Every structure is written in C-alpha cells, then in structure tokens.
Image (cartoon, rainbow, N blue to C red):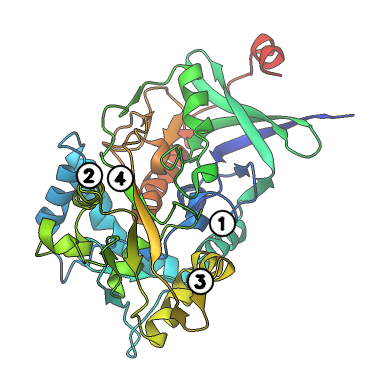
Amino acid sequence: MPKDITVEGIDVLVVGGGLAGVYAAIKAIEAGAGMVVQVDKGQVGKSGCSCFAAGVMHTFFPQEDNLEDRVRRLVRAQGYLAQQDIMASQMEQSWPVTNEMADLGVDFVRTTDGALERRPGRGSYPIISFYGPQLMHAMGRAAAGKGAEQVHRVMVTDLLTSDGQVSGAVGFHTRTGDFYVFQAKATVLATGSTWYKGRMPGHRDTTGDGYAAAYRAGAVLSGVENNDAPTNVMPIGRYDIGPGMNKFVGEGGFFINARGERFMEKYNPTMKERSGLRFLVYALCMEARQGNTPLFMDMTHLSPEAVARLKKVLPLAMKMFESVGLVAGDRFVEPVEWMPQAPVGRPGLVVNGDFESTMPGLYAAGEVCAPQAVVTGLSAAATSGAVAGTSAARRARSLKQLAPDSGQLAELK
C-alpha cells in the first residue's frame, strides 16, 4: 500500500533536477540555508533538458566580449520584450559561474594551454563546449556533496499555500505511489518548460508541470505572446535526433537543398548557417516554397578530427546518428534531413531581480521563468539558479515554517 510521507523542517525546497535546480540547491546551502531538499521526477543530474543539452554554453568573456552588444542581441531576440537589467546581470555572472562549474568537476573543452576553448557556433560570438551528459553528472554530485538531500522519482504536482504564501509542495513517487508532503519556508521551481513540445527532438523532456502548478496556486505567468518565433530548425523528418546545431555548423556543416545547392548564402551572405534562428527558419521555408525540398545539413565533408570532437561533445546525438546509419566510423556517410519548427510559445513565472515570483515564498530559475527574464540555454539556467537559491535562503533565515492547511492537503492528495 502507498504510504504518506511528510518531510518537515525544510529551509529551501528545490523542485527540478537540472542545472538551474542544482545551482539553486548549491547556492542556498552556501547562503546559509539549513535543510535543502531537491526533488526530481526522474533522477537529479540525469533527466530533463540539461542532460539533453547541445554540448555548448554561451558564456560572456569579460576580457573579450562587448556586454552592451551581447545584451542588445539578447533583447532583440526576445522581440524587445525583455527585462534588460536581469539579462545583463545574467550575462555578467556567466563567466564566474562557468569557472565555478569547472571547479566543481565539469570537464570543459580546453586549448593546449588549459584555457576554455571558444569555437564558432550560431551567432556572432563563439561558444564553449563540454563533454555531454558528464556536466550534469558532475553538478548533481556537487549538490549532494554540498549537503542537498536529493529525492529521486517523486513527481511534484502542486504547491502548498498558507495565507497567500507558498509553504512547500506535494507529489507522489512514480514507482511506489507514496504521497509526499514537503513543508518548506521557501520553494524554488526549476522544472523547465514546454519549449520543445511538438515534433521537436527532446519534447518529452519538457513537461511544463512546474509552472502549471504555480498557476494553479496563484502565481502570475507571462510570455506566451513572446515565442521567439520562429523557434528552431532540427534534424527531424525521419529521425528524432537533436539538438546540436551550434556544434554542427561550428565544425563546418552547411545546409543544402534537394538540388544539392548551398542556399544560406542567398539569405544571409555574411553569417550563412551561423545566422539567428529566425533567418534560418525563413530560409528553409522559402526553399520549401520554391519546391527545393527535402532540405539537408551536409556534414559528409567533415574531417575525422571534427567528427571525433562531435562524438565527445554530443555523444547522445552522435550515437543516434550512428544507430540509423548516418554516421559510420569517423565520417558522416550522407546528408541529414533537416526541417524548420513552427513557433512554439512558452509561458513562465513573472520574476523580479531576485527571481522571486509574484507569490511570497516562491522563486523560479531556468526556463520555468518567463522568457523576458531568462533566455533558453544552460548559462542562463545556471546564473538564474544561483540567484534564486541565494534569495530563497535569505527568506528562509527570516521566517518560521507556516503550518499546512489540512483541507488543502486532503484535496491535493
């Protein structure tokens, strides 16, 4: 029979096991929170979009990059519906956070002299790379090593509220059916979004359950109108493989149409395949309109060294390419069919500079935040998680635990 399990005395409850969640847990502990509990419906460090990420981070290099220009590009990508001060702060924090991740055991790609290696990707600024899922393995271990109590395979379904404040969460164990009650002084949602829903690869990893629970509890959501449209282009068609385009174009992959023509030069002669997503989507749609489909990413010319780098940085995607016969040994043996993805809006919690939501006691990090506050990507997940965890710990120090509402508990159960 399923049991009722109550976890009391939590200072900071973190819901979600990706990079935003582990960073929130780590920073809450470092900020003085006593009991920090991190809950994931899969396993912390081994589920969700952070493990599925494309092997790259958009880190701001203070000695090389122009902060004003980078923020301007982010704001423009959001259709100018953006909390610019928050985005600037995240960009500035990305450098120390990246170095801290390295200190915690994340293995980044480096040059022969030990510096972080920057290589071309999409966009005007180079990217740094890491070796696939090991990033989240290392960060999950780091959070546990700092003292976070990790609860695996518990699906949080709803938030607890008392006197208009969030006072914890409830959920159930996905294997035993046990009903869990987490009583917490402060709660951080880091549950991701539904960014990849539809036919995009990885859409199963983004369920949107966190902000659905927040909405039911009374938090204000925003951002559905800001869909960063058009959103993406992916190697789908016959395959459910991706992402990784930053690395593919960075290593020299380019788009061709059914005639074998490299067509991005017509639409953006300067950036070509490194163009922003809206340029890429428009170009692929125009080629389709002209009857030049199917469309492909051609990587058959990549050197064995380039393919070897892709296998290290994108091991999951490359294994899938091998499984369907697109990669054999150290070569791509044929072009990969590619197609655009229609606009996909994502809502999220409205947050302030402390990543506190409109409900006292509830904080948010990563893509569960509204898109005007947090853009997609691991760098933003880490920096927002760091601030949310610190802010939640500060609140927890000044509060007593609110008693749960027995009627609400019974209804949610």
Query: Does residue 276 appear left or right of residue 38 in this picture?
Result: left
User: Alpha carbon of mark 1 to alpha carbon of mark 2: how far?
Assistant: 50 Å
Q: Amino acid at mark 1?
A: Ala
User: Alpha carbon of mark 2 to alpha carbon of mark 3: how far?
Assistant: 48 Å
For marks 2 and 3, the one nearer the N-term is 3
Q: Residue at x 55, y 64 (%)?
A: 320
Q: Find disc 2 in the rendering and name its residue.
A: 289
Marks 1 & 3, CB-CB < 8 Å contact:
no
In x, y percent, where is residue 310? Answer: 43, 74
Q: Amino acid at mark 4?
A: Val
Q: Residues within 10 Å of mark 3 (few under 14, many from 20)?
A: some
For marks 1 and 4, the one nearer the N-term is 1
For marks 1 and 3, the one nearer the N-term is 3
Q: Find disc 4 in the rendering and name its residue.
A: 375
Q: Residue at x 26, y 32 (%)?
A: 226
Q: Is residue 268 visible?
A: no
Q: Please identify, in this view, whether the residue under mark 2 or under mark 4 is nearer the observer.
A: 2
